[in-house]
């Protein structure tokens, strides 16, 4: 493996890890209406490499920000 390929792989892994962390923090800060739904989206976001993308496309819009949910918006 060349050094360029190693950098690409390492960069992809780091980016995926950071996006997974962001998705999990976002799930924690949203209200999905039920604990089961929140847990399910958390599990989806935790799947390596693709979970964060699935959550970003489909799950994020299903939850409300915690501040909005508490304000009744």
Image (cartoon, rainbow, N blue to C red):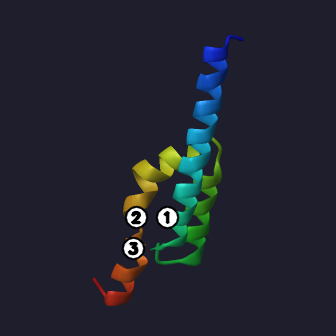
Horizontal and vertical percent position of residue 51: 57, 47
Horizontal and vertical percent position of residue 28: 55, 70
- Marked residue nearer the N-terminal end (3 or 1): 1
Q: Nearer the viewer, mark 2 or mark 1?
A: 1
- Marked residue nearer the N-terminal end (2 or 1): 1
Q: Is residue 5 left or right of residue 28?
A: right
Quarter of the image for residue 40 reads bottom right
**Residue appearing at x 39%, y 73% in the figure:** 65
Nearest the viewer among 23 and 9 is: 9
Single out the residue that lies furthest toward the right: 1
Q: Badge 3 is on which residue?
A: 65
Asked if labels 2 and 3 touch by Cβ distance under 8 angstroms, the answer is no
Q: CA distance from mark 3 to mark 1?
A: 9 Å
Q: Which mark is residue 26?
A: 1
Count how many numbered circles sit on residues in the image. 3
Horizontal and vertical percent position of residue 50: 56, 41
Q: Residues within 10 Å of mark 1 (few under 14, many from 20)?
A: some
Q: Badge 2 is on which residue?
A: 62
Horizontal and vertical percent position of residue 24: 57, 61
Asked if labels 1 and 3 touch by Cβ distance under 8 angstroms, the answer is no
**Residue appearing at x 34%, y 80% in the figure:** 68
Q: Residues within 10 Å of mark 2 (few under 14, many from 20)?
A: few
């Amino acid at each position: 493996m060349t050094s360029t390929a190693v950098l690409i792989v390492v960069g992809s892994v780091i980016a995926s890890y950071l996006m997974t962390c962001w998705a999990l923090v976002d799930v924690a800060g949203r209200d999905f209406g039920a604990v089961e739904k929140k847990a399910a989206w958390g599990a989806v976001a935790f799947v390596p490499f693709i979970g964060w993308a699935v959550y970003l496309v489909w799950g994020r819009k299903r939850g409300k920000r915690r501040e909005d949910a508490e304000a009744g918006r």
